[in-house]
Image: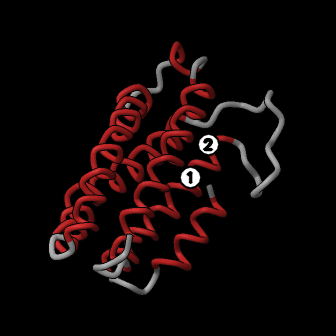
């Protein structure tokens, strides 16, 4: 996911101030995700018998994650969709992408509900599996968001 982020930042950085700040929030989500999952570098993971992260770390991650998702829904997507209205092909493609992006929000909100406010030890046993599933959803979401941002560059006559 970090390599995907670097590619996204290279491709879309500098187009819009809003996108730049949103990509910076994505970077923060990814860094905190890597900390929680025990990834110490792009390719190396810590041993599986590692201690689970402190509830405060999980809460901070959830705050950043929910902020990122909220910025997407209430600022970035609406702005991008508005800019794409003038290109019917791009607008149609955005209409296809948007529901798929929204669907990933359920995984984010579910994770936040389970771990964001509480430090329940009962749930901690499921933490690694839940974090892994969340990572898959985030990877999918980032790809879809990148497709949406890429539509800004589509010429009106692109097939």
> Label 1 belongs to which residue?
32
Count neighbours of disc 2 (C-alpha within 10 A) and say few if under 14, some if 14 to 19, many if 20 or more.
Answer: some
Q: Nearer the viewer, residue 145 or 132?
A: 145
Q: Which residue is farthest top?
A: 122
- SS for callout 1: helix
Instruction: Look at the numbered discs 2 and 1 and tell me whether their residues touch, using CB distance below 8 Å.
Output: yes
- Residue 133: image location, x then y, percent: 55, 32
Q: Tell me residue 119's x, y (percent).
A: 47, 26
The CA distance from mark 2 to mark 1 is 6 Å
SS under mark 2: helix
Quadrant holding the C terminus: bottom left
Above or below: residue 131 compared with residue 27: above
Position in image of residue 120 (x %, y %): 47, 19
- Residue 148 in the figure: left or right of residue 124: left
| Badge 1 density bin: few <14, some 14–19, many ≥20, Cα 10 Å | many
Q: Which residue is mark 2?
A: 36
Residue at position x 51%, y 18% from top? 123
In the picture as drawn, the residue positioned furthest to the bottom comes out as 14
Name the residue nearer the viewer: 139 or 119. Answer: 139
Examine the rendered structure and indicate whether residue 39 appears above or below residue 76: above
Give the side of residue 31 with respect to residue 61, left or right: right
User: x, y (%) of residue 92?
Assistant: 24, 59
* Residue name at image x 56 percent, y 79 percent: 10
Residue positioned 58% across, 36% down in the render: 54
Give above or below for 114 relative to 97: above
Q: Which mark is residue 82?
A: none
Image height of 102 relative to 86, above or below: above
């Amino acid at each position: 996911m970090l390599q995907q982020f670097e590619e996204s930042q290279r491709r879309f950085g500098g187009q819009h101030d809003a996108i730049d700040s949103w990509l910076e929030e994505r970077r923060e989500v990814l860094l905190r995700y890597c900390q929680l999952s025990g990834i110490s570098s792009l390719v190396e993971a810590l041993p599986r018998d590692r201690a689970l992260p402190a509830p405060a770390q999980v809460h901070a991650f959830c705050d950043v994650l929910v902020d990122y998702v909220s910025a997407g829904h209430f600022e970035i997507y609406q702005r991008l969709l508005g800019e794409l209205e003038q290109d019917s092909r791009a607008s149609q493609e955005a209409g296809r992408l948007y529901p798929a992006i929204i669907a990933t929000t359920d995984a984010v909100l579910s994770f936040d509900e389970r771990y964001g406010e509480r430090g329940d030890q009962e749930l901690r046993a499921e933490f690694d599996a839940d974090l892994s599933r969340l990572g898959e959803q985030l990877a999918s979401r980032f790809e879809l968001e990148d497709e949406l941002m890429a539509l800004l560059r589509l010429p009106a006559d692109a097939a």
